[in-house]
Image: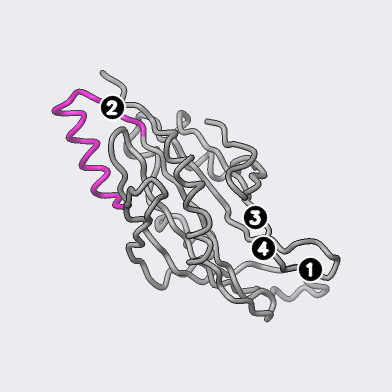
Amino acid sequence: MDLPDTSQSWQFNKTAASQEELGALSSDTEFSKAICLSARPGEYAADGRLVPDRVDLSIVLSGTDLNNSIHRPERCMPAQGHTILSSSDQPLKLPNGRQFNAKRLVSVQSQQVATATEREQYAKYNCVTYYFFVGHDRVTNNHLGRTFIDMKDRLIRGMDQRWLMLLFPCGMEKCHGLKRKSPSRRLIRKYKTSLLTLQKSKSNGIRL
């Protein structure tokens, strides 16, 4: 389950799954992760380099264990310091005309920062996270609905399919008291052409 090095204007810098991620899910679960960067035309940092947009992409391919393979991100985000403020459906229209809903989570994440003293200090980030699930013949952002589809397929169709979960946090703002405009909606418009390429890598159903 390899990610491309580039897609449209995005550069994919691949990263490994953490031991915490590997230990939380069943052993046959597969991960692909990347920090995706795309330069903003006309915006430069103090050192003269182009300022990039950033999306942290995670793709999880489920195994055969329904209970310990993939789960909705809301389940583990609090352990990563997130306080989820809202959850909603976000329609995504791809260049091929197809449209589906992604789940959009707005949260505040607290992260400990290094200091010169022993006193603990935390920086807070306003975050926007999108995710959805890709199956053999459908896309959904509803984890419970995905579970019912799995049960129906196993009982009626004799098919054990592996699901992809695509998760991409983006639009982070406010670092150490410095604010920047959240680009989440603009990023989704910019990123959706790459989603079409990734969405074509669907898992096939496995006959029992």
Looking at this rendering, what residue extends furthest in the top direction? 208
Circle 1/circle 3 CB separation < 8 Å: no
Label 3 environment density (alpha carbons within 10 Å; few <14, some 14–19, many ≥20): many
In the image, residue 118 lies in the stretch drawn in magenta: no
Spatial separation of the CA atoms under disc 2 and disc 1: 49 Å
In the image, taking residue 68 as reference, residue 1 lies left or right, namely: right
The kind of residue on which mark 3 rests is Ser
Viewer-nearest of discs 4 and 2: 4
Residue occupied by mark 3 = 38
Q: Residues within 10 Å of mark 2 (few under 14, many from 20)?
A: many
Q: Is residue 141 left or right of residue 50?
A: left
Q: Residue at x 32, y 52 (%)?
A: 100
Is 3 in front, or is 155? 3
Q: Residues within 10 Å of mark 1 (few under 14, many from 20)?
A: few
Please state the horizontal and vertical placement of residue 62, each as a whole percent of the image: 40, 35
On residue 144, the disc is none
Identify the mark nearer the N-term, 4 or 2.
Answer: 4
Question: Percent x, y for residue 170?
Answer: 54, 61
Amino acid tagged 1: Ala
Contact between marks 4 and 3 (CB within 8 A): the answer is yes
Q: Which residue is mark 2?
A: 160
Tell me the SS state at disc 1: loop
Dividing the picture into quarters, in which one does residue 202 lie? top left
Pointer 4: what residue?
Answer: 40
Mark closer to the chain start, 3 or 2: 3
As displayed, is residue 87 above or below residue 63? below
Which amino acid, by three-letter code, is at mark 2?
Asp
User: In terms of secondary structure, where does tag 4 sit?
Assistant: strand
Quarter holding the C terminus is: top left
Q: Which residues are magenta?
A: 141-162
User: Which structural element holds mark 3?
Assistant: strand
Question: Which residue is identified by label 1?
Answer: 45
